[in-house]
Image (cartoon, grey):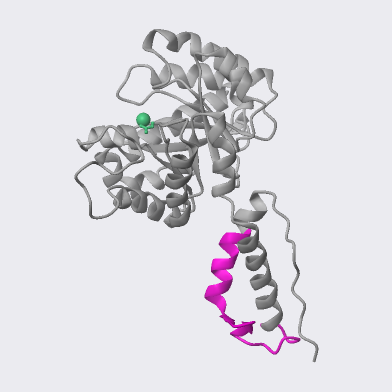
Amino acid sequence: MTASDSPPATQPQPLRPRRSCLAVPGSNPRFLEKAKGLPADQVFLDLEDACAPLAKPGARKNIVAALNEGGWGDKLRVVRVNDLTTHWTYRDVIEVVEGAGANLDAIMLPKVQSAAQVQWLDVMLTQIEKTVGLPVGRIGIEAQLENARGLLAIDEIAQASPRIQTLIFGPADFMASINMRSLVVGEQPPGYDVGDAYHHILMSILMAARAHDLQAIDGPYLQIRDVEGFRRVAGRSAALGFDGKWVLHPGQIDAANEIFAPSQDDYDHAELILDAYDYYTSEAGGLKGSAMIGDEMIDEASRKMALVIAAKGRAAGMSRTSAFTPPQS
Ligand code: GLV
Ligand code: MG
């Protein structure tokens, strides 16, 4: 195929909700089948750490078959390939995208260390899309930050390709890579008693994501039976502004979907602020720059905050339970 008969380039896809991102080992056909019916916003079929080295070739085939069989509903379908310090990555990408590129939304690249690694994946995807006749640029990239090098290069990584959709925190590998003295993901390292040891990493990921219009995703919580612990840790990253979190077990999915969507009260209030602000800044409302709703003063900054909450609620399929009524004159 020559450049002139390439399929048309596609615009970057609008971001879809990723409140819960379910990890599914590609080497286990039973888990792949079960994942189809679970209510996660995203599944990622794993060729990396959840697959033993000797199981990786079989896992590639299982993943291609599972994607092509369908039945995933409107979940985002992502495949995590091996990182670029291994010899598996190129074959992971070629087999999965040649085999099931039309039924795949994004590739997740773990342990990203530089913009060049993301650009490598972008070029690979473009070549495969052109070769097999897929729209160029539709398949997204999710970049997982799991070491100090990656974090120091995060601003370049975040803008390395128009395909990038998310920046993801990989806490287990990150803790290992910086020699953090702890084996428990999600908890503070023993001996550190002056704050949150992960705050800098989480905020760096969030800042880069917001600066470049990407989603910020928190990583796994490994105590899979401790749903209360999951809620506590997920609640922290949700409060900072993260868009979602990995889930490793079906029991964590409902909690993630709930925690990363606004509460009904907050959602209703956000929609109320938007309607009230629209009204008060209009001719009918007196062209006001700021106005009162009850005891609360709202202005343009309130509208921006309300937009964030309203957008998350709408993306999560929420409907409002109250409406704004303009005051009688
Ligand atoms: C996930 O990949 C992690 O390392 O936490
Ligand atoms: Mg990892």
Residue at point 46%, 37% (across, down) = 142
The tally of labels here is 0
43 in relation to 306, above or below: above
Residue at point 26%, 46% (across, down) = 152
115 in relation to 222, above or below: below
Q: Residue furthest bottom?
A: 329
Q: Position of residue 134 (x, y in %)?
A: 62, 28
Given residues 319 and 275, the one toward you in this image is 319
Residue at point 30%, 40% (across, down) = 150
Left or right relative to 252: residue 317: right
Q: Is residue 163 magenta?
A: no
Quadrant in which residue 323 is drawn: bottom right
114 in relation to 97, above or below: below
Q: Quadrant of ligand 1?
A: top left
Placement of the N terminus among the 4 image quadrants: top right
Q: Position of residue 298 (x, y in %)?
A: 58, 79
Q: Position of residue 297 (x, y in %)?
A: 57, 82
Given residues 87 and 246, the one toward you in this image is 246
Residues drawn in magenta: 281-310
Decide if residue 161 is in sight here. no
Residue at point 63%, 26% (across, down) = 103
Decide if residue 189 is in sight here. yes
Quadrant in which residue 114 is drawn: top left
Placement of the C terminus among the 4 image quadrants: bottom right
Given residues 93 and 17, the one toward you in this image is 17
Given residues 55 and 223, the one toward you in this image is 223
